[in-house]
Amino acid sequence: MGDLLIRPHRAPARVQLMDDPGPLGRFGEYGGRYVPESLIGACRQVEEAFRSAWADPAFRNQLAGLLATHVGRPTPLTPAVRLSAELGVTLLLKREDLTHTGSHKINNVIGQALLATRMGHKRLIAETGAGQHGVATATAAAMFGLSATVFMGERDIERQALNVFRMRMLGAEVVPVRTGARTLKDATSEAMRHWVGATEDSYYCMGSVLGPMPYPWMVREFQRVIGDEARRQCATALPTAVPDYVVACVGGGSNAAGTFAGFVDTTAKLVGVEAEGGAGASRGTLGVLHGVRSMFLQDDDGQVLEAHSIAAGLDYPGIGPEHVHLRDLGRARYVTVDDAEVVEAVVRLARTEGIVAALESAHAVAWVIRAAADGTLPAGSTVVLTLSGRGDKDISALKELL
Amino acid sequence: MKLPSDHKILMPYLTGGAVADWTDHLRALIDAGADAIEIGLPFSDPTLDGATIQEATHAALTRGATLRGILTRVSEVAGTVPLVASTYANLVVRDRDFCGNLRDAGFDGLIVPDLPLEECAEFENQDLDLVLLASPATTDERLDEIARRSRGFVYAVTVMGTTGERETLAASAADLARRLTNRCELPVLLGFGISTPAQAAQAAQLADGVVIGAAIMRRVLDGAGPAELGAYLRSIREAMDEG
């Protein structure tokens, strides 16, 4: 009965940042579990299973093994030699673009699929926008012999036909969502509706540090491998061992959360880069969507707005609750770049380093380029930037733009 | 709010602003024997609603319905039967004056499906009766807490799913109704998937009353006028009273 006696409260102040948010999933005043009563039991089961698995060395070892054999971890920390020289800073790229399936999304999905298997589930449900999380989910489902149902907005299905084909080839069912603007926000709503009626046999595999407790915490923990690896790699790559800046793009914020987790207890300045048209931290206001209390783009009447970004993966009108908490504490700052800067950054990185980054990841590159030019990044700064994904999926879009 | 105890409670639902003459529909429902009315305040992302109420919500927002506009028109009918607002947590948490504004407009209660026990404390004992929901998956421990903390009535969600019409009353309805009525002094109303007079009569036998939502909104979206909607609700009322 003890855990049912719930009183209004704030989470106690933590010395340790990016730690366990407790059973209520609070990151300061954000987070929580804003789901219908029908989903409370399912969320609790996922939380209990994750707590037990994450404390179990056998689970951790199995996951680490899969990340090595199937994902290609550890990913390199690549010195961007020529771009660094041009910018007058030392830029190191954490290469999530080199993972299996081409983005950091796979780190989280392998973890959750392993957890789903441990819980005895045979089916994964997921939402996807650009299709990267959907492809990762379809991939993990195939690896573990699970079935997968991916909800995707009809408009995104049209824009991302190749990823839809890829998911279906991997054996996943892709369900078109025809409500609202027919993009990621609507796909997430529809996936949650479906979950309400499928909790018995299905596991909801959320793609970002969003949703009800335990998802924001669990997804950050599954992604922290990015930051933990980068921290170790910095110890040998940098004379100072710790960079001056750590930069990552932010939609919901999973690659940034995983990256920041490795550096939050250091002196490194943490910078999250949002899309101008999808800037939950920079332009959002307090709200609740898809099970979590955080910052969302919304009108004066509380209707949630559609995000607009050249990068479909950043096309979400909110941001993970822990990011807002880090911002409020002053531990991380969040900035925006616009579509034009992003396209320029893709080209510049390609021509200086031979790396074609995803449009999402190029947001982080674009900010570093701007900040080095305007002095926000002092000359000689050391910068770790998480390159969350590769640009193959964006080639046809870029072809139209360039 | 005061709900009748001498007969089974009938609470129809109407999405505020879904059609131009929605307050005429509201009056017709009251005239047809509604004991209370649930008025949906449209939210862009109704994650617990099925296709019909999603469509009604979309229609309302497309028509330009606003919270302020709906509250103004609700005050026209306030004072007749208890009025219960239902909406999603976003509208509630973002606005300190939300509950007070609803009270001022004449609302008696509030239903917020994505505001479970863990999150609702700051909105309890405010100006409005905060009605809590229970589902077939809710444990007995949680039902005890819901029965203790809910105000006005307890909303029993009969099915593990979203709102919407269904062929038959879910088997899970009877079990949940029994578990709730055993421990609850407040009235227990069953909702989700109740659309025909026979289903309403059957559900009313299990608890203290029923909520009818999607079946009403489908008729409204299909163009039913107040008279037609009133006739439909009267058929439900009669079936429940004959029991």
Image: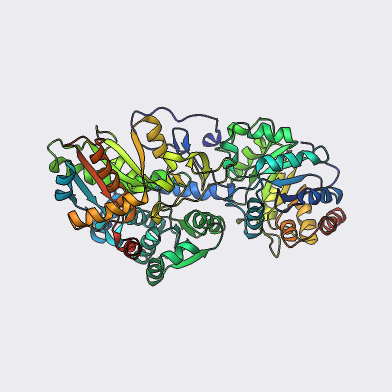
The C terminus of chain B sits in image quarter: bottom right
Q: Residue at x 41, y 65 (%)?
A: A160
Image: A287 above or below A163? above
As rendered, which of B9 and B137 lies closer to the eye?
A: B9
Q: Residue at x 71, y 40 (%)?
A: B71
Is A43 displayed left or right of B32 in the figure?
left
Image: A41 above or below B98? below
Question: At which x and y percent is residue A114?
Answer: 36, 56
Question: At which x and y percent is residue A217?
Answer: 40, 43
Q: Residue at x 79, y 61 (%)?
A: B198
Q: Quadrant of residue A214?
A: top left
Q: Quadrant of residue B72?
A: top right
As rendered, which of A300 and A196 lies closer to the eye?
A: A300
Image: A72 above or below A326? below
Is B1 displayed left or right of A177 in the figure?
right
Q: Residue at x 24, y 35 (%)?
A: A375
Q: In which quarter of the image is residue B234?
A: bottom right
Image: A165 above or below A384? below
The N terminus of chain B sits in image quarter: top right
Question: At which x and y percent is residue A378?
Answer: 21, 34
As rendered, which of A20 and B40 lies closer to the eye?
A: B40
